[in-house]
Image: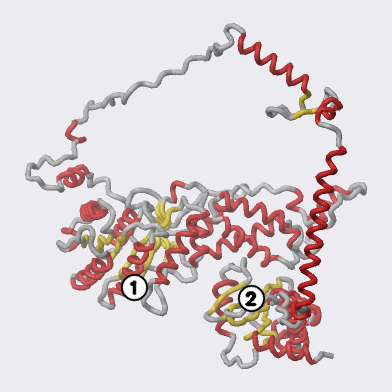
Amino acid sequence: MMTAAMKSTMVRAEKMLDFFTIFSKGGIVLWCFQGAGVTESFTGPVNALIRSVILQERSGNSSFSHGGLSLKYKLDNEFELIFVVGFQKILTLTYVDKFINDVQLRFRDRYKNELEQKGALKLLNNSFEFENDFKMLLSVAEESSKARGPAGMRTFEQSGKSQKTVKSMIETKGGDKGKEQGGKKNKNAKKEAPAAQPAKGDQDKASPSGQKMVENGNQSLTAEEILQKNREEFFRKHRPGASEKPSKSPKPQKPKGKQNRVWNTGGISTRDLDYSDKNGNGSPNGAEQNLEAQFDPEMQPASMKGDLLSVEYESSDEEEMEEEDEEVVVRETSKPSSKKGGGLFGMLKGLVGSKSLTREDMEPVLEKMKDHLIAKNVAADIASQLCDSVAKKLEGKVMGTFTTVASTVKQALQDSLVQILQPKRRVDILRDVMEAQSQRRPFVITFCGVNGVGKSTNLAKISFWLIENGFTVLIAACDTFRAGAVEQLRIHQRRLNSLHPPEKHGGRPVVQLYEKGYGKDAAGIAMEAIAYARNQAFDVVLVDTAGRMQDNAPLMTALAKLIAVNMPDLVLFVGEALVGNEAVDQLVKFNQALADHSMSDKPRLIDGIVLTKFDTIDDKVGAAISMTYITGQPIVFVGTGQTYNDLRSLNARAVVSALMKA
């Protein structure tokens, strides 16, 4: 029977929870509860949880936010159930984690037979009467959280001060004086006490000659040993020739100054090395014209028409991670078997899936997997969340026959990584550009990122790919901060036009540069470039922005303004594959800055990622995982070199194969 206090607690707890639902991984809702006064359906937040967390293998963190609601969930992998509770984000409910665990255990124990049938139609036909148990568990959880909470403040009547009178306070002072006097007597007694001890000289005489002393850092040496040591040092210092240091082999002397370079000019004219202006007309572009003259038209890049090639890795199935015995075998007991012939039997017993997986079974393997991911450049926080997600996904599952813990965990981790790298939505730029053409407007792509990651270089590669597919490109030079940024884009423009001469395209250059110099407002230049592209019927506008660190507030505000004012079709973050933990900080702060300085209720965030310098990292491809996990957005382009052809698309399985390679 429930007491009146428990009933009132239960009513109050029901008002705090918006909903609680139990459903299978197949989408069948087995039981649900909706809080008092809640009119909105819980299907929206639950569907968002399924799309953004469960299907994307992001269950490392058991909490999720949607609008004003905070959702907690728990997976039951043995019966393939999901328990979800939702409550207002402003509430701090400390008992939710324990409560959802209690509900899971009670529901499993009560309907174990029905759940073991594993049939969707059978589950639909069953009626799960769980409301009374749910309310009882909710009231118990609420009461237990109260018991653990801090004690309330006492009233004045309950305190000891309310019982004191003036007389008692005077007596207390007198008592304190008596205590003080007693304390003084005790101090005097303590001062007199040392008189009974022997004198210091007697103590020195009484101390044996072999007593240990601590002097000048000579711990654990007797007085005689210290004297002997000092004598030896004295004679060694005053011995003739003692000050001379033993001769060492002479170090080779470094040459003074810089050595003259020897130029091998055989068959090469020195004019080929001179890039200065020889026109005599003061033209600042003489160096660029010499560069173009040296560009060999026969050394043209290969055609990039159509979709980009994907990144490939050479990996063999024989290369597996080294696995220790205690990580491979499902440990039934902690002590080895002492029976004869137990070796083979114990090995088979470990291989055969005879029990459901627990967190303790997976912990050694997960710890090794986590260290392996960090060594492959995955951010440490992301590696921990991935391993936690795999543990939640596998906990309670019964292993198949002749399978090991390590192989099961590794396969689950590979599936999770592939799911993370595969985009939720496909970014097809060629199709989007053709759709923008039908609307008679340019398709606008904005590039942003930190300093030195290769924004301008990869912008030129993407320009070449778009030109190869028959589109005209306008490059907007909105990096008005870095010296030489406009000149770099101008050289790329001339190189691209030399690869695709205007004569082959109706006399019109296929790529043009829109620039207004340095020190101007980048957002205004981008707006003018887009208007110019619309009037001149350009197909694509590529907006190059200045590199900026994620902690530079003024530059981040300027970037957010550029994106908010011009509303580009695609915002690409350019990041290098060499970063580890820094990738998380960069992407989080870039997204946060775009959200904070946006002018609309739905701010434009990063839509995709360009991963550069991919050819410099061998198999340490963890930055791809970190960036995709943080943003949830796909890697659209991968830069693999320094030529216009070195642009690829991401192959998720090839990257995961390289990541898991030992």
Give the residue displayed 39% in from the left and 72% down from the top: 604
- Residue 25 visible to an observer of this rendering: yes
Q: Quadrant of residue 134?
A: bottom right
Q: Is residue 207 left or right of residue 658?
A: right
Q: Position of residue 345 (x, y in %)?
A: 86, 52
* Mark 2 residue element: strand
* Mark 1 residue element: helix
Q: Quadrant of residue 507?
A: bottom left
| Kind of residue indicated by mark 2 | Lys
Give the residue displayed 48% in from the left and 47% down from the top: 617
- Report the disc number at residue 510: none
Above or below 496: residue 141: below
- Report the disc number at residue 72: 2
Give the residue displayed 30% in from the left and 62% down from the top: 466
The quarter of the picture where the N terminus appears is bottom right
Q: Position of residue 208 (x, y in %)?
A: 85, 25
- Residue 116 visible to an observer of this rendering: no
The answer to which of 17 and 321 lies nearer the viewer is 17
- Report the disc number at residue 564: 1
Q: Position of residue 642 (x, y in %)?
A: 35, 48
